[in-house]
């Protein structure tokens, strides 16, 4: 069922609701991609069809130009905003060319695009509307799109419970939303290896992720300074890992928007791969931390494998909460950072003999919940200064690993509860939608929408037939 419907006011919220209830192809007004993606690395995409690509071929940048933009507060130069919009438009055009009856949602397709490229977008719109149902909103080139659109919708900014469809006012917003959200989801033919290769090419490229400063200061430490060097090196490791970890929220949002624009097929797989990569980064930083400790420490008090694994899991306990909540929730950046910082803050107050809460009866028992306590228990001689240390390093490491998993286990429970809540909500929405779809009002509105579509096509075909006849007549003269 092919159609192009245009929204004139109060529009973006309506499109967001369409996307919320339908896994459609969705291009936002300010759509984000990971800025370090090399355009030429996008799978199954021909960038030479972009109207500006000749510029980069002449400058010999066609193999190296990146998408560009900002992630985690770091700006990466690449394509301009308008060029990124054209890239997204061409991407979905190429992806959907071999499909039919998809629902494609476009929010301000002309925003940020110069007039020189308007014919390009118009041409792609006309091509896609022949096969798919398109919902778009615009404040630019309204007259041009009005001649193309089969239906126009006005959503009032004052009363959003009612909408105006064509010349009919007072139509229920939910009814209009369901009636216009017609179309199939995009299905990928080849997934798995292609997405894995793309992920590795992007994330392991020279531009991949956010650059951070790697630095450890060299000093000589004598026996008896072990707690000090562990605290100092852990602080340095924490601040080295933070710039990378703090990009997780932006990365998650950009990756979701990429999937909406058909750049890749699996949001879940990409999140899992990013989690694995973050764990590798944490392991690398912990290994460097352990190596630096060996280099600066006089004696062999911190050389055991217990210390290495203790440092690794202690470091992971500090950074993993931010990674999990950053990747696998929709929480905003500020909330993720607040939640992710809590384990570190609580560790400072309760975990060791240096902590403010260490000497308070009752409260001091909280130290058993923190990996840092068991790490300090593994320092030769220091276990005698801490109350309640396990009898052996093996026991201490076991408890250290278990306590480092407290937050991940709590997160899994939280995620399971959220998944159940989402499942129940969708079931309720499906029941409500079923009742609405079977109503007389729904049938009448759809008939109105797509009857006008047929009339529009007939007029266009009549116009084309007249032109063909005139051309034929001229050729015979």
Image (cartoon, rainbow, N blue to C red):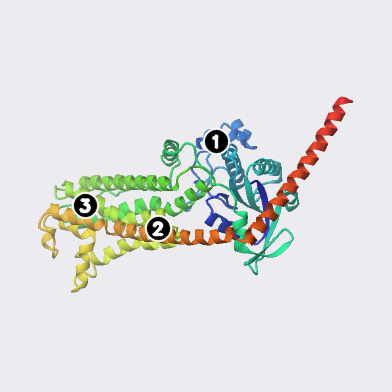
Query: In the visual, does 332 lie left or right of 47?
Result: left
Please determine whether, in this image, residue 365 is positioned above or below residue 416.
below
How far apart are the two marked residues, 3 and 2, measured between alpha carbons? 33 Å
Query: In the visual, does 429 lie left or right of 347?
Result: right
Q: Could you tell me if residue 246 is visible in this image? A: no
Rendering quarter of residue 389: bottom left
Judging by the rendered image, the residue that carries numbered circle 2 is 419
- Comparing 157 with 422, the one in front is 422
How far apart are the two marked residues, 3 and 1, measured between alpha carbons? 46 Å
Mark 3 vs mark 2: in front: 2
Q: Residue 115: give x, y in percent of width and height.
A: 71, 45
Which residue is rendered at x = 23% and y = 63% of the image? 369
State which tag comes first along the sequence, 1 or 2.
1
Rendering quarter of residue 321: bottom left
State which tag comes first along the sequence, 3 or 1.
1
Judging by the rendered image, the residue that carries numbered circle 3 is 310
The residue tagged with tag 1: helix, strand or loop?
loop
Residue at far top of view:
476
Judging by the rendered image, the residue that carries numbered circle 1 is 45
Which residue is rendered at x = 67% and y = 49% of the image? 4
Query: In the visual, does 53 lie left or right of 343?
Result: right
- Comparing 369 with 186, the one in front is 186
Which residue is rendered at x = 36% and y = 54% of the image? 324
């Amino acid at each position: 069922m092919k159609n192009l419907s245009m929204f004139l006011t109060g529009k973006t919220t309506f499109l967001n609701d369409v996307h919320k209830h339908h896994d459609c192809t969705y291009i936002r007004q300010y759509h984000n991609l990971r800025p370090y993606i090399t355009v030429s690395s996008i799978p199954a995409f021909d960038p030479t069809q972009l109207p500006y690509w000749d510029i980069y071929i002449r400058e010999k940048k066609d193999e190296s130009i990146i998408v560009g933009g900002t992630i985690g507060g770091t700006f990466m130069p690449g394509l301009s905003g308008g060029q990124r919009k054209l890239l997204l438009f061409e991407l979905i055009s190429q992806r959907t060319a071999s499909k039919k009856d998809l629902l494609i949602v476009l929010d301000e397709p002309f925003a940020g695009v110069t007039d020189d490229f308007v014919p390009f977008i118009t041409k792609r719109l006309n091509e896609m509307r022949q096969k798919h149902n398109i919902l778009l909103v615009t404040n630019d080139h309204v007259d041009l799109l009005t001649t193309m659109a089969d239906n126009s919708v006005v959503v009032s900014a004052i009363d959003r419970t009612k909408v105006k469809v064509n010349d009919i006012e007072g139509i229920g917003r939910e009814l209009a939303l369901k009636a216009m959200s017609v179309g199939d989801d995009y299905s990928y033919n080849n997934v798995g290896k292609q997405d894995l290769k793309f992920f590795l090419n992007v994330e392991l490229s020279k531009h991949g992720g956010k650059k951070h400063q790697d630095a450890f200061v060299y000093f000589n430490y004598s026996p008896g300074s072990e707690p000090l060097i562990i605290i100092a090196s852990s602080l340095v490791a924490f601040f080295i890992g933070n710039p990378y970890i703090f990009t997780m929220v932006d990365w998650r949002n950009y990756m979701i928007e990429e999937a909406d624009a058909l750049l890749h097929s699996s949001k879940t797989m990409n999140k899992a791969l990013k989690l694995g990569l973050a764990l590798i980064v944490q392991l690398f930083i912990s290994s460097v931390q352990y190596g630096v400790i060996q280099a600066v420490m006089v004696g062999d008090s911190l050389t055991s494998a217990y210390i290495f694994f203790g440092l690794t899991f202690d470091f992971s306990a500090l950074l993993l909460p931010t990674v999990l909540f950053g990747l696998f929730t929709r929480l905003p950046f500020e909330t993720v950072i607040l939640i992710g910082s809590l384990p570190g803050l609580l560790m400072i107050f309760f975990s060791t003999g240096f902590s403010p809460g260490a000497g308070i009866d009752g409260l001091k028992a909280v130290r058993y919940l923190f990996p840092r306590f068991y790490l300090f228990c593994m320092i030769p001689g220091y276990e005698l200064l801490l109350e309640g240390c396990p009898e052996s390093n093996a026991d201490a490491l076991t408890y250290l690993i278990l306590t480092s998993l407290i937050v991940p286990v709590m997160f899994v429970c939280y995620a399971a509860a959220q998944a159940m809540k989402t499942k129940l909500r969708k079931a309720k929405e499906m029941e409500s939608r079923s009742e609405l779809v079977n109503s007389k009002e729904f049938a009448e509105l759809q008939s109105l929408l797509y009857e006008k579509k047929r009339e529009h096509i007939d007029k266009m075909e009549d116009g084309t037939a007249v032109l063909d006849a005139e051309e034929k007549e001229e050729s015979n003269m």
